[in-house]
Image (spheres, rainbow, N blue to C red):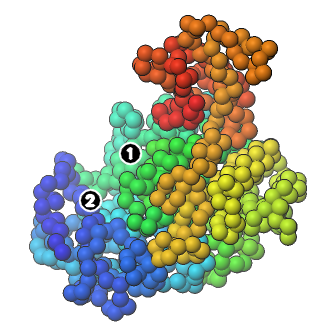
Amino acid sequence: MKTILLGLLLASTSLGLNAQVLDIPLNGEWLFIADSADFSTGLPSEAVTVSVPHTYNIMDGLEDYAGKAWYEKRIEVPADLKGCQLKAEFEAVYHDAFIYVNGKLAGSHAGKGYTPFTVDITKYVKYGQENTLVVGVNNAYSASNFPYMRSFDWANDGGIYRKVNLHVTGSKSIRYAHFTPQLSPADSIGTCKVSIRLHEPQVKGATFGIKVFDKQTHQPVFQTRTMLRRSRQGTFETTINCGRVLPWHFDHPNLYGFEVSVIEGGTVSDTRKGHFGFRNFQIEGNRFVLNGEPVRLPGIETMPGSNPDFGMAEPEGYIQESAAMLKDLNTTITRFHWIQGEDMLNALDSLGILAQEELSWWQQPRGQLTPEQEALAKETIAEMIEAHYNHPCIYAWAVSNEVRDNQAAVANLGAFIKELDPSRMAESVGNRIYQYLDDDPSLLLDIPTWNEYIGTWHGSGKKIREELPDYFAKISPVLNGRPLFITEYGLCEPAFVGGDRRRTDDMLYHIKEWMRQEFVTGYIYFCLEDYRTQMGEEGLGRHRIRRHGITDNRHHPKPSYYVLRDLMSPVEIDKVQPSTAVRDNKTLAGVWETKADDRTLIVGIAVKNSIPSYTLRGYTLKYVDAKGSPRSIALPTMEPGQRYEIALPEVNDCFKFKICRPDGGVCMDY
């Protein structure tokens, strides 16, 4: 295996004036072995070369392996880095990680397989020499983890399955820089509270450089260099005024980049970069409200790790493809059963898809948590919020999913979330609000939720979906004017047979019922793909799945994909006719008569006012005219429940056209 030469990377990296900050990717070739022996000082000769990010549960013979494994990478650290701080940054290792440098334990991260962590390896490194970096991994099922034992419905993929980076800094280093944007909907004036924490708790004062710029135009918005004193909470805080800004919206995902540096003696000691967005998302009455506008939102969930070629170690391009499919389906809102990585959240930020992240506490342990479990839950939640605080796509943090009798834990963890991030909502996902009614755990937090499976997993003994309206009638009084969010529904095969034809039929029934209920503020269909899971009923090895998707596990669409896409489209076409057409009612079909040279088509566009329901700004109608030239017609701002007629000059013979979102994506084909 090749040794990484940090000296070559150092020479080829542009540092900027007086800067001593480096980010050196440690992805790519590592040695690997799955074995319970101790290889902390280095791997044996039978180790194989793999490419990190990596999961061993898609390797032949290890598909069902749950236990210890080892990774090794050799790094040559140049002598001129002596005096710098070196931190190994892991975006995630599932689920226990022990980091050894030259045979010595430098740090560990146990029971938290979905959150990023940093290990300071400075004092273990030999400068001017080759160093051995070994990571011990364990994905054994455990009662100490979230998810708990084998009670979770997704893949148990062990390994260094997300990116690894070596961050080199001066004596002061930034742990995080959080931006809390405030948007005034009336005039689009944006301000930000900036909260910075250093890795060095002893530092009482420091000079910081703060830059903010429009990520679309790269134009500067704010820049300052300021001395800040540490607060009692251990952070360095200031408020900045960004003037008139462009709000973040699912149709207009405007992002603002930032660069925060800590400066020592005129030298940049460390720099952190990222982005954020200005948006307000809250509940008023029985509606979600985005930037002052009441909305009802449709969406679908994706289950990463389902492609058997990648498992949880999905490459960045494939993650972006998954997110792009959500957008193609007209998704405005989604959720995840576990904490995601930066690649997925960055994609959702840039595409404009709201998302909820949650602690992976699914069904078990039932009831209250032990003190040790609650402590681990809080550690995980804290790491999740710290890492993903700046992502505008995230609207809520959730504490559990389909757990019974856990009201005290939900209340405690919800309050803990509010301490860490009062700017977002807290949520507990439930599946039995129709049974618990006013004692349902989801009612304790901001958003009442329901994983609604009436007619399949839930309902009376008859399992008849037509009982759904009666359950809504029972639920409505306990909401007390609040909204209900449908957080999950779909057809799980082979537990419930019928194939994609039944999936489509059930989809149509349930979504139409949700639309009829005024208090249902949105839904998330489950799910995008047939997903890999250690609980799967179908397939063998890495191909074990639950057939639950509107695509297969490699994202090939089924017919139900296109049905859901149309259901989630914000528009319907209710008129297509030539401008001079007159109906001939004497004919059986009531055909149109028109002038032979009439090349203008009138299209009627009805904006939905059920689910979805939101104002459309910046949409276009596109078509190829009779001469083969592309045409684009800018549509007016279109309000929910309203209807608009648009003339298409020189229309093509087939009357083909499409309505496109502001990003150019198609929301409706005709």
Residue at point 16%, 71% (across, down): 2
Going by the picture, which residue comes out furthest to the bottom? 37
Give the vertical position of 387 relative to 504 (above or below). Answer: below
Query: In front: 548, or 33?
Result: 548
Query: In front: 511, or 264?
Result: 511
Q: CA distance from mark 2 to mark 1?
A: 17 Å
Which percent across, then down, holds residue 383?
49, 66
In front of the other: label 2 or label 1?
2
Which residue matches tag 2? 23
Which residue matches tag 1? 258
- Residue 19 visible in this rendered orientation of the protein: yes
Residue at point 81%, 58% (across, down): 465
Which percent across, then down, holds residue 112?
49, 74
Q: Residues within 10 Å of mark 1 (few under 14, many from 20)?
A: many
- Residue 444 visible in this rendered orientation of the protein: no
Amino acid carrying label 2: it is Asp
- Name the quadrant of the N terminus: bottom left
Residue at point 27%, 62% (across, down): 25
Q: Quadrant of residue 439?
A: bottom right
Give the vertical position of 637 relative to 210 (above or below). Answer: above
Which percent across, then down, holds residue 445?
71, 60
Amino acid carrying label 1: it is Phe
Q: Secondary structure at mark 1?
A: strand
In the drawing, does residue 326 fall left or right of residue 310? right
Residue at point 49%, 64% (across, down): 306
Looking at marks 2 and 1 on the same chain, the residue that comes earlier in the sequence is marked by 2
Q: Secondary structure at mark 2?
A: strand
Give the vertical position of 66 relative to 228 (above or below). Answer: below
Q: Residues within 10 Å of mark 2 (few under 14, many from 20)?
A: some
Q: Which mark is residue 355?
A: none
